[in-house]
Amino acid sequence: MKTTYRKHILTSAAALVMTALVSCDEVSQNDRYILGEPVKAERGVLLEDFTGQACINCPDAHKVIEQLEEQYGADKLIAVSIHCGGFGLSTSRTDFNSGRIGLMAEEGNAIMEAYGIKSFPMGVINMGSPMVYDLWPTEVRNAIKVETDVNIDLDAAYVPDSRDGENGYFGTIDIKAEVKSCINRIADIQFWIIENGIVASQRSTSGTIDDYVHNNVFRAQVFDGLRGSQISLAAGFPNETAGSIANRWTDKEHWVPENISVVAFVSDNSGVLQVVRKDLCPDDTETGEEEQS
């Protein structure tokens, strides 16, 4: 399979059906999660957070993610917030001049449909069954204790373009992963682009927050399909997979390389075997001035 990125396109009819089905689930204060005792993190756990800027209860789910990241570390609990469905604001509606920024990409809607998500906020852990956010801590705790024989060595870098400067970043994100397994197996690998620190509106139970800081925002995927590109793993021998995607700097999307991370995960029919996250630009690397909104 090619390593170039191809955008998913949803039909208008499918989008309308999903909009009609979604609802914003409420969880009472008495049903809130309780964090358990710390456990040793044996592996990475992928938490797909299905969210939207118009979902008033989604900020509560984001708080659960923040506490789980604090408990286990963001290198072990790897959250990806996928803006989608009837509560999402499409990137096509972005108007930087007026300060309106949409975070919903069509790729995110395709992932939502693959899981059959119909209410928000909702989460999927290690490609399992969708669940409400008060159940996430227990499921993450159980998943993070499961040992895995799969290891991913991930490398990602931003390759600047001659046009880079005050008016944006037009380079390329190059990604390479070396995967090792202790047994022979056929699996799939996917690369996702996520971004932190995006200031945009968010509805909440107390009203609209104009300067809400969105983290772990799903921006794009490198390979087609939910699971990505198939790979063959021979016991003890590394498998190398590479991919690239153009950094998006348009009138609808501004990806800031300093805020970008790459998530790589390997999966099979049992779910996610391993997941890792790599910041595109380490703290000691700069690409220029930060995005001005």
Image (spheres, helix red, strand yellow):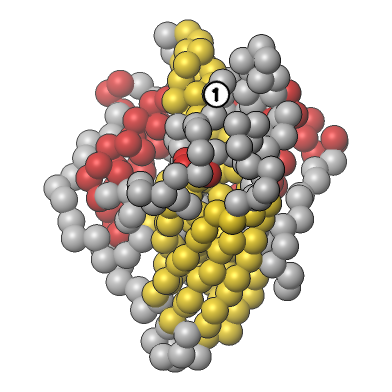
**Rendering coords of residue 104 (x, y %):** 65, 34
Residues 142 and 105: in front is 105
The answer to whether residue 225 is seen in the rendering is: no
**Rendering coords of residue 216 (x, y %):** 46, 41
**Rendering coords of residue 212 (x, y %):** 46, 20
Would you say 228 lies left or right of 49 here?
A: right
The answer to whether residue 157 is seen in the rendering is: yes
Taking the spot 27% from the left edge, 37% from the top edge, the residue there is 67
Q: Secondary structure at mark 1?
A: loop
Give the answer, above or below, for where 122 lies relative to 58. below
Residues 85 and 208: in front is 208
Q: Quadrant of residue 228?
A: bottom right
Give the answer, above or below, for where 107 lies relative to 269. above
Q: The N terminus is located in which quarter?
A: bottom right
Taking the spot 33% from the left edge, 54% from the top edge, the residue there is 75
Taking the spot 38% from the left edge, 26% from the top edge, the residue there is 60
Taking the spot 22% from the left edge, 45% from the top edge, the residue there is 71
**Rendering coords of residue 62 (x, y %):** 40, 32
**Mark 1 crowd level (few <14, some 14–19, many ≥20, 10 Å Cα):** few
Which residue is situated farthest in the top direction here? 207
Give the answer, above or below, for where 184 lies relative to 43. below
Q: Quadrant of residue 158?
A: bottom right
Residues 195 and 132: in front is 195
Q: Quadrant of residue 21?
A: top right
Q: The C terminus is located in which quarter?
A: top right
Q: Which residue is mark 1?
A: 292
**Identity of the amino acid at label 1?**
Gln
Which residue is situated farthest in the left direction here? 37
The tally of labels here is 1
